[in-house]
Image (cartoon, rainbow, N blue to C red):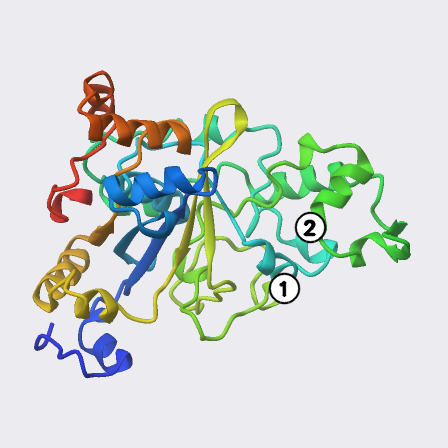
Amino acid sequence: MGKIPRLDISLKQFEKLVLNTNPMFNVIPLKVKMTFTELNSTELKNLEEYANIVDGTIERWLLVPDVLPLGALSYIIDRAFGLLPEPNNVFVLPDEDWFRVCPDMGVFMDYCGSVFDNPTDIAYSECMGEVSYSNKRGFPPIFPALVLPSFVTYEDAQKAVKESFSDLLGKKIDYKGKKMKFEECPADLDFFASYSGKGEEFMFFDNLALDMQLRDVLQREGRKLYSLRDRPVTKRALDDKRKAKPFTEKLLMVRPGDEGEDAYTFEISIPENVYSIINEGFLSVEDYVESIKYVLRNCTPDCIYKKGYDLFGPDQLFYHDFIMAIHSGDAESYMQEAKNCGWKEPYVDLKWVLR
Protein backbone atom coordinates (compact mmCIF):
# COMPACT_ATOMS: atom_id res chain seq x y z
CA MET A 1 0.00 0.00 0.00
CA GLY A 2 2.91 2.39 0.49
CA LYS A 3 3.06 5.26 2.94
CA ILE A 4 0.00 7.13 4.11
CA PRO A 5 -0.21 9.99 1.60
CA ARG A 6 0.00 13.63 2.57
CA LEU A 7 -2.83 15.89 1.50
CA ASP A 8 -0.58 18.04 -0.64
CA ILE A 9 0.20 15.34 -3.20
CA SER A 10 -1.71 15.31 -6.45
CA LEU A 11 -4.69 13.06 -7.04
CA LYS A 12 -2.73 11.27 -9.76
CA GLN A 13 0.14 10.55 -7.36
CA PHE A 14 -2.29 9.43 -4.67
CA GLU A 15 -4.06 7.02 -7.01
CA LYS A 16 -0.72 5.62 -8.07
CA LEU A 17 0.14 4.99 -4.42
CA VAL A 18 -2.99 3.32 -3.15
CA LEU A 19 -5.98 3.22 -5.47
CA ASN A 20 -4.63 1.11 -8.32
CA THR A 21 -2.81 -1.65 -6.50
CA ASN A 22 -5.21 -4.51 -7.29
CA PRO A 23 -4.72 -6.01 -10.77
CA MET A 24 -8.39 -6.97 -11.02
CA PHE A 25 -10.01 -3.63 -10.25
CA ASN A 26 -9.46 -0.06 -9.09
CA VAL A 27 -11.02 1.59 -6.06
CA ILE A 28 -13.03 4.71 -6.85
CA PRO A 29 -14.86 7.17 -4.61
CA LEU A 30 -18.56 7.75 -5.24
CA LYS A 31 -20.58 10.70 -4.06
CA VAL A 32 -24.26 9.81 -3.77
CA LYS A 33 -26.76 12.49 -2.87
CA MET A 34 -30.54 12.69 -2.63
CA THR A 35 -32.28 16.07 -2.73
CA PHE A 36 -35.70 16.60 -1.17
CA THR A 37 -37.75 18.17 -3.95
CA GLU A 38 -41.26 17.52 -2.63
CA LEU A 39 -41.05 19.45 0.66
CA ASN A 40 -41.80 23.10 1.40
CA SER A 41 -39.38 25.54 3.03
CA THR A 42 -40.69 24.91 6.56
CA GLU A 43 -40.33 21.15 6.17
CA LEU A 44 -36.81 21.54 4.77
CA LYS A 45 -35.89 23.73 7.74
CA ASN A 46 -37.17 21.02 10.08
CA LEU A 47 -34.95 18.45 8.39
CA GLU A 48 -31.94 20.74 8.71
CA GLU A 49 -32.56 21.29 12.40
CA TYR A 50 -33.47 17.76 13.44
CA ALA A 51 -31.81 15.45 10.86
CA ASN A 52 -28.63 17.29 9.82
CA ILE A 53 -29.93 17.64 6.25
CA VAL A 54 -28.47 20.92 4.99
CA ASP A 55 -29.87 22.56 1.84
CA GLY A 56 -32.38 19.74 1.51
CA THR A 57 -29.66 17.24 0.56
CA ILE A 58 -28.61 13.97 2.19
CA GLU A 59 -25.25 12.46 1.17
CA ARG A 60 -23.17 9.31 1.39
CA TRP A 61 -19.58 9.04 0.13
CA LEU A 62 -18.49 5.52 -0.70
CA LEU A 63 -15.40 3.66 -1.85
CA VAL A 64 -16.26 0.91 -4.33
CA PRO A 65 -14.56 -1.42 -6.82
CA ASP A 66 -14.88 0.05 -10.31
CA VAL A 67 -15.96 -3.36 -11.63
CA LEU A 68 -19.18 -3.12 -9.63
CA PRO A 69 -22.27 -3.78 -11.80
CA LEU A 70 -25.17 -1.36 -11.55
CA GLY A 71 -27.39 -4.10 -10.16
CA ALA A 72 -25.08 -4.43 -7.15
CA LEU A 73 -24.73 -0.66 -6.83
CA SER A 74 -28.50 -0.42 -6.41
CA TYR A 75 -28.27 -2.65 -3.35
CA ILE A 76 -25.32 -0.68 -1.95
CA ILE A 77 -27.05 2.68 -2.25
CA ASP A 78 -30.21 1.39 -0.59
CA ARG A 79 -28.19 0.03 2.32
CA ALA A 80 -26.02 3.14 2.64
CA PHE A 81 -29.16 5.23 3.10
CA GLY A 82 -30.81 2.80 5.52
CA LEU A 83 -33.35 1.35 3.08
CA LEU A 84 -34.30 -2.22 2.33
CA PRO A 85 -33.17 -3.41 -1.12
CA GLU A 86 -35.69 -2.42 -3.78
CA PRO A 87 -35.79 -4.70 -6.85
CA ASN A 88 -37.48 -2.04 -8.98
CA ASN A 89 -34.72 0.57 -8.72
CA VAL A 90 -33.60 1.79 -12.15
CA PHE A 91 -30.59 3.72 -13.43
CA VAL A 92 -31.08 6.43 -16.03
CA LEU A 93 -29.06 9.22 -17.59
CA PRO A 94 -29.74 12.84 -16.61
CA ASP A 95 -31.87 14.66 -19.18
CA GLU A 96 -28.96 16.90 -20.15
CA ASP A 97 -26.86 13.84 -21.07
CA TRP A 98 -29.43 11.81 -22.96
CA PHE A 99 -29.17 13.34 -26.45
CA ARG A 100 -25.38 13.56 -26.30
CA VAL A 101 -25.04 9.90 -25.37
CA CYS A 102 -27.89 8.76 -27.59
CA PRO A 103 -28.21 11.28 -30.45
CA ASP A 104 -30.69 9.48 -32.71
CA MET A 105 -33.11 6.59 -32.80
CA GLY A 106 -30.71 4.47 -34.83
CA VAL A 107 -28.07 4.64 -32.10
CA PHE A 108 -30.66 4.03 -29.42
CA MET A 109 -31.99 0.92 -31.13
CA ASP A 110 -28.48 -0.43 -31.76
CA TYR A 111 -27.74 -0.36 -28.04
CA CYS A 112 -31.01 -1.77 -26.70
CA GLY A 113 -29.97 -4.95 -24.96
CA SER A 114 -26.41 -3.81 -24.29
CA VAL A 115 -26.38 -0.30 -22.81
CA PHE A 116 -30.15 0.01 -22.45
CA ASP A 117 -32.19 -2.86 -21.12
CA ASN A 118 -35.54 -3.07 -22.77
CA PRO A 119 -37.22 -5.55 -20.41
CA THR A 120 -39.64 -6.79 -23.10
CA ASP A 121 -42.43 -8.53 -21.20
CA ILE A 122 -40.17 -9.52 -18.27
CA ALA A 123 -40.49 -7.13 -15.34
CA TYR A 124 -37.32 -6.18 -13.53
CA SER A 125 -39.11 -6.87 -10.27
CA GLU A 126 -39.58 -10.49 -11.30
CA CYS A 127 -35.98 -10.80 -12.47
CA MET A 128 -34.32 -9.13 -9.49
CA GLY A 129 -36.57 -11.05 -7.15
CA GLU A 130 -34.55 -14.11 -8.10
CA VAL A 131 -31.41 -12.53 -6.63
CA SER A 132 -31.43 -13.18 -2.90
CA TYR A 133 -29.32 -11.43 -0.30
CA SER A 134 -28.82 -13.46 2.84
CA ASN A 135 -28.06 -10.60 5.21
CA LYS A 136 -30.29 -7.56 4.95
CA ARG A 137 -28.06 -5.47 7.21
CA GLY A 138 -24.70 -6.47 5.79
CA PHE A 139 -23.45 -6.48 2.24
CA PRO A 140 -23.21 -9.75 0.33
CA PRO A 141 -19.89 -10.61 -1.33
CA ILE A 142 -19.40 -8.62 -4.50
CA PHE A 143 -18.13 -11.37 -6.75
CA PRO A 144 -21.45 -13.25 -7.01
CA ALA A 145 -22.95 -9.93 -8.06
CA LEU A 146 -20.27 -9.50 -10.71
CA VAL A 147 -21.85 -12.33 -12.61
CA LEU A 148 -25.36 -10.96 -12.15
CA PRO A 149 -27.15 -12.67 -15.02
CA SER A 150 -28.44 -10.74 -17.98
CA PHE A 151 -32.14 -11.41 -17.68
CA VAL A 152 -32.89 -10.12 -21.17
CA THR A 153 -30.53 -11.19 -23.94
CA TYR A 154 -29.33 -8.79 -26.57
CA GLU A 155 -31.22 -10.76 -29.22
CA ASP A 156 -34.48 -10.67 -27.23
CA ALA A 157 -34.13 -6.94 -26.60
CA GLN A 158 -33.41 -6.26 -30.27
CA LYS A 159 -36.43 -8.27 -31.31
CA ALA A 160 -38.65 -6.45 -28.82
CA VAL A 161 -37.53 -2.94 -29.72
CA LYS A 162 -37.93 -3.61 -33.45
CA GLU A 163 -41.41 -4.96 -32.84
CA SER A 164 -42.28 -1.86 -30.82
CA PHE A 165 -41.11 0.45 -33.61
CA SER A 166 -42.16 -1.80 -36.51
CA ASP A 167 -44.65 0.75 -37.83
CA LEU A 168 -41.94 3.42 -38.05
CA LEU A 169 -38.80 1.63 -39.21
CA GLY A 170 -37.43 2.97 -42.51
CA LYS A 171 -40.21 5.55 -42.85
CA LYS A 172 -40.22 9.34 -43.05
CA ILE A 173 -41.53 10.85 -39.83
CA ASP A 174 -42.95 14.32 -39.21
CA TYR A 175 -40.75 15.10 -36.21
CA LYS A 176 -41.88 18.45 -34.79
CA GLY A 177 -42.57 19.92 -38.21
CA LYS A 178 -39.54 18.41 -39.95
CA LYS A 179 -39.63 15.36 -42.22
CA MET A 180 -36.91 12.91 -41.18
CA LYS A 181 -36.12 9.25 -41.59
CA PHE A 182 -37.16 7.53 -38.37
CA GLU A 183 -33.68 6.16 -37.60
CA GLU A 184 -32.20 9.67 -37.98
CA CYS A 185 -34.70 11.37 -35.68
CA PRO A 186 -33.47 12.50 -32.24
CA ALA A 187 -33.88 9.77 -29.63
CA ASP A 188 -36.90 11.54 -28.17
CA LEU A 189 -38.62 8.62 -26.49
CA ASP A 190 -41.42 10.74 -25.01
CA PHE A 191 -42.28 12.02 -28.48
CA PHE A 192 -42.35 8.56 -30.05
CA ALA A 193 -44.28 7.06 -27.13
CA SER A 194 -46.99 9.63 -27.82
CA TYR A 195 -46.60 9.42 -31.61
CA SER A 196 -47.04 5.65 -31.67
CA GLY A 197 -49.62 5.45 -28.90
CA LYS A 198 -47.48 2.89 -27.06
CA GLY A 199 -46.58 4.96 -23.99
CA GLU A 200 -46.53 2.16 -21.40
CA GLU A 201 -44.53 -0.06 -23.73
CA PHE A 202 -41.76 2.56 -23.80
CA MET A 203 -41.59 3.09 -20.04
CA PHE A 204 -38.33 1.24 -19.45
CA PHE A 205 -36.55 1.81 -22.73
CA ASP A 206 -34.09 4.31 -21.24
CA ASN A 207 -33.12 2.14 -18.26
CA LEU A 208 -29.43 1.33 -18.19
CA ALA A 209 -28.46 -2.34 -18.21
CA LEU A 210 -27.95 -3.61 -14.67
CA ASP A 211 -24.99 -5.80 -15.60
CA MET A 212 -22.87 -2.92 -16.90
CA GLN A 213 -19.90 -2.16 -14.67
CA LEU A 214 -19.30 1.25 -13.18
CA ARG A 215 -16.01 1.75 -15.01
CA ASP A 216 -17.82 1.27 -18.32
CA VAL A 217 -20.46 3.91 -17.54
CA LEU A 218 -19.32 6.60 -15.10
CA GLN A 219 -16.40 8.98 -15.64
CA ARG A 220 -14.67 11.33 -13.23
CA GLU A 221 -15.58 14.97 -13.85
CA GLY A 222 -13.43 16.73 -16.41
CA ARG A 223 -12.12 13.59 -18.10
CA LYS A 224 -12.87 12.24 -21.55
CA LEU A 225 -16.40 11.05 -22.23
CA TYR A 226 -16.95 8.49 -24.96
CA SER A 227 -19.94 8.19 -27.23
CA LEU A 228 -21.90 5.01 -27.70
CA ARG A 229 -20.32 4.75 -31.14
CA ASP A 230 -17.02 3.97 -29.35
CA ARG A 231 -18.49 0.81 -27.81
CA PRO A 232 -19.10 -2.67 -29.20
CA VAL A 233 -22.80 -2.99 -29.93
CA THR A 234 -23.55 -6.50 -28.75
CA LYS A 235 -20.89 -7.26 -26.14
CA ARG A 236 -22.10 -6.62 -22.59
CA ALA A 237 -19.47 -7.96 -20.20
CA LEU A 238 -16.07 -6.30 -20.02
CA ASP A 239 -13.01 -8.38 -20.72
CA ASP A 240 -9.41 -7.71 -19.76
CA LYS A 241 -8.44 -6.69 -23.27
CA ARG A 242 -10.98 -3.93 -23.78
CA LYS A 243 -10.64 -0.56 -22.11
CA ALA A 244 -13.68 0.96 -20.46
CA LYS A 245 -15.66 3.52 -22.45
CA PRO A 246 -17.44 5.66 -19.82
CA PHE A 247 -19.99 8.01 -21.33
CA THR A 248 -21.40 10.11 -18.48
CA GLU A 249 -20.23 12.06 -15.41
CA LYS A 250 -23.50 11.58 -13.57
CA LEU A 251 -25.96 8.75 -13.06
CA LEU A 252 -29.42 8.83 -11.53
CA MET A 253 -30.90 5.95 -9.55
CA VAL A 254 -34.67 6.20 -9.19
CA ARG A 255 -36.34 4.33 -6.33
CA PRO A 256 -40.11 3.89 -6.82
CA GLY A 257 -42.60 4.70 -4.12
CA ASP A 258 -46.24 3.81 -3.68
CA GLU A 259 -48.60 3.78 -6.64
CA GLY A 260 -45.82 4.05 -9.19
CA GLU A 261 -44.57 7.44 -8.03
CA ASP A 262 -40.84 8.10 -7.64
CA ALA A 263 -39.95 8.13 -3.94
CA TYR A 264 -36.29 9.09 -4.05
CA THR A 265 -33.87 9.98 -6.84
CA PHE A 266 -30.16 9.55 -6.09
CA GLU A 267 -27.48 11.42 -8.03
CA ILE A 268 -24.23 9.48 -8.38
CA SER A 269 -20.87 10.97 -9.40
CA ILE A 270 -17.14 10.44 -8.94
CA PRO A 271 -15.74 13.40 -6.96
CA GLU A 272 -12.45 14.86 -8.12
CA ASN A 273 -10.97 13.84 -4.78
CA VAL A 274 -11.97 13.27 -1.16
CA TYR A 275 -9.80 15.99 0.31
CA SER A 276 -12.79 18.23 1.02
CA ILE A 277 -14.23 15.86 3.62
CA ILE A 278 -10.73 15.19 5.01
CA ASN A 279 -9.88 18.87 5.34
CA GLU A 280 -13.23 19.60 6.98
CA GLY A 281 -12.49 16.97 9.63
CA PHE A 282 -15.11 14.41 8.60
CA LEU A 283 -12.54 11.77 7.66
CA SER A 284 -8.97 11.18 8.77
CA VAL A 285 -6.27 10.18 6.31
CA GLU A 286 -5.63 7.06 8.40
CA ASP A 287 -9.29 6.00 8.23
CA TYR A 288 -9.34 6.74 4.51
CA VAL A 289 -6.37 4.50 3.80
CA GLU A 290 -7.75 1.78 6.10
CA SER A 291 -11.01 1.92 4.14
CA ILE A 292 -9.16 1.59 0.83
CA LYS A 293 -7.33 -1.47 2.18
CA TYR A 294 -10.67 -2.95 3.25
CA VAL A 295 -12.15 -2.52 -0.23
CA LEU A 296 -9.03 -3.87 -1.95
CA ARG A 297 -8.87 -6.87 0.36
CA ASN A 298 -12.55 -7.82 0.19
CA CYS A 299 -13.74 -6.37 -3.13
CA THR A 300 -16.50 -4.88 -1.01
CA PRO A 301 -17.73 -1.27 -0.75
CA ASP A 302 -17.26 0.95 2.27
CA CYS A 303 -18.82 4.19 3.48
CA ILE A 304 -16.41 7.02 4.33
CA TYR A 305 -18.79 9.95 4.91
CA LYS A 306 -22.40 10.29 5.94
CA LYS A 307 -24.48 13.48 6.03
CA GLY A 308 -28.08 13.36 7.18
CA TYR A 309 -30.12 10.73 8.98
CA ASP A 310 -30.99 7.49 7.19
CA LEU A 311 -34.07 7.48 4.99
CA PHE A 312 -37.25 5.67 5.90
CA GLY A 313 -40.69 5.34 4.40
CA PRO A 314 -42.37 5.36 0.99
CA ASP A 315 -41.94 9.05 0.20
CA GLN A 316 -40.36 12.34 1.27
CA LEU A 317 -43.33 13.66 3.27
CA PHE A 318 -43.56 10.44 5.27
CA TYR A 319 -39.85 10.76 6.04
CA HIS A 320 -40.34 14.34 7.27
CA ASP A 321 -43.15 13.20 9.58
CA PHE A 322 -40.96 10.38 10.86
CA ILE A 323 -38.14 12.80 11.74
CA MET A 324 -40.58 15.12 13.50
CA ALA A 325 -41.95 12.18 15.50
CA ILE A 326 -38.40 11.35 16.64
CA HIS A 327 -37.92 14.98 17.71
CA SER A 328 -41.18 15.09 19.63
CA GLY A 329 -40.47 11.75 21.34
CA ASP A 330 -43.49 10.17 19.69
CA ALA A 331 -41.70 7.80 17.30
CA GLU A 332 -42.32 4.53 19.13
CA SER A 333 -44.93 3.42 16.61
CA TYR A 334 -42.43 4.02 13.77
CA MET A 335 -39.19 2.88 15.32
CA GLN A 336 -39.48 -0.90 15.31
CA GLU A 337 -40.58 -0.99 11.69
CA ALA A 338 -37.82 1.48 10.77
CA LYS A 339 -35.12 -0.67 12.38
CA ASN A 340 -36.55 -3.81 10.77
CA CYS A 341 -36.14 -2.03 7.44
CA GLY A 342 -32.49 -1.26 8.16
CA TRP A 343 -32.77 2.30 9.51
CA LYS A 344 -29.80 3.07 11.76
CA GLU A 345 -29.43 5.54 14.59
CA PRO A 346 -27.47 8.65 13.48
CA TYR A 347 -24.59 7.93 15.86
CA VAL A 348 -23.83 4.49 14.33
CA ASP A 349 -20.14 4.26 13.36
CA LEU A 350 -19.41 4.59 9.64
CA LYS A 351 -17.81 1.15 9.69
CA TRP A 352 -21.22 -0.40 10.29
CA VAL A 353 -23.04 1.40 7.48
CA LEU A 354 -22.10 -1.25 4.91
CA ARG A 355 -19.91 -3.76 6.74
> Who is closer to the viewer here, 317 or 32?
317
> Who is closer to the viewer here, 116 or 315?
315
Q: In the rendered image, which quarter is residue 289 located in?
A: bottom left
Whether residue 4 is situated above or below residue 256 in the rendered picture: below
Badge 1 density bin: few <14, some 14–19, many ≥20, Cα 10 Å: some
Q: In the rendered image, which quarter is residue 180 located in?
A: bottom right
At label 1, the amino acid type is Arg
* Residue to which mark 1 is pinned: 100
* Residue to which mark 2 is pinned: 109
> Of callouts 1 and 2, which one flags the residue occurring earlier in the amino acid sequence?
1
> Who is closer to the viewer here, 266 or 282?
282
Q: Secondary structure at mark 2?
A: helix
Q: Are marks 1 and 2 in contact (CB under 8 Å)?
A: no
Q: Position of residue 117 (x, y in %)?
A: 56, 43
Outermost residue to the top: 333
Q: Position of residue 154 (x, y in %)?
A: 58, 45
Q: Secondary structure at mark 1?
A: helix
Quadrant including the N terminus: bottom left
Q: Position of residue 194 (x, y in %)?
A: 78, 37
Task: Between label 1 and label 2, give the one nearer the viewer.
Answer: 1
Residue drawn at the location 44% of the way across and 61% of the way down: 218
Q: Position of residue 271 (x, y in %)?
A: 34, 66
At label 2, the amino acid type is Met
Residue 301 seen in render: no
